[in-house]
Image (spheres, helix red, strand yellow):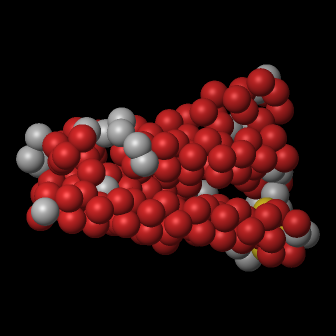
Amino acid sequence: MRSACYGGAEELPIPVVALLNLLFGIGFALVARDRVRADGPFTAPAFPLVMLHAAAVVAPIALYFYAVHPAWSWMYWVDPRKLAGVAVLPLMVGHAALVVGGWYLGAVAIRRGFQNTVIYAGAATALTLLVLFVAGSNRLFTAADYLGWQTRRGTSLFNVQLGWAFVVSLLALFGSAIYTAIELGRDGRRVRGAVIR
């Protein structure tokens, strides 16, 4: 089936989900800034909440997509048939590590008094994510295998199971991120309340 979903032939692959995970980590550090300033990046409940999001939500979603929809997960940049099946494990860990890495780097910078730098880094990451999303939306919203993409054959993402899996995953990812941010914010208020007393 020919698709009208394709853009220019030289369109680059887009690391949208990787940047999104990094952005979540940076955002979590900003929301938890009071706890981070008071106790550092590895204290409870902030760090366990971030780890829970990374390990229980981000890692399984990455594992599912790289194992079940590998060509799309690679954004048609790599032929997944040429990779060992075990390659999904470092990719799964890598996506979770981006959340934790964004958290850690943001927390360390905030603790050292560079909160504005963290805000600028988060804004730059969000802007880059937006530009790449718009520029590469053809890849993101086309379902095909690697050869199908190369020969410009594919279908809309939402004509196949992949589209609905993508929507459910985004809901889980953002739902978990919102819950984590709310809990980090509550913890920050407890820290501020303890300082005022």
Relative depth, front residue between 117 and 131: 117
Relative placement, left or right, of 96 versus 84 is left
Camera sees residue 135: no
User: Which residue reaches farthest front?
Assistant: 197
Please report the residue visible at 11 percent of the width from the left and 48 percent of the height from the top. Answer: 114
Residue 52, compared with residue 180, is above or below; it is above
Camera sees residue 186: yes
Relative depth, front residue between 56 and 123: 56
Relative depth, front residue between 193 and 31: 193
Q: Residue 130: horizontal and vertical position, in percent?
A: 42, 68
Relative depth, front residue between 164 and 7: 164
Q: Residue 191: horizontal and vertical position, in percent?
A: 24, 57
Q: Quadrant of the C terminus?
A: bottom left
Q: Quadrant of the N terminus?
A: bottom right
Q: Residue 28: horizontal and vertical position, in percent?
A: 38, 56
Q: Residue 58: horizontal and vertical position, in percent?
A: 62, 49
Relative placement, left or right, of 141 versus 156 is left
Please report the residue visible at 61 percent of the width from the left and 42 percent of the height from the top. Answer: 55
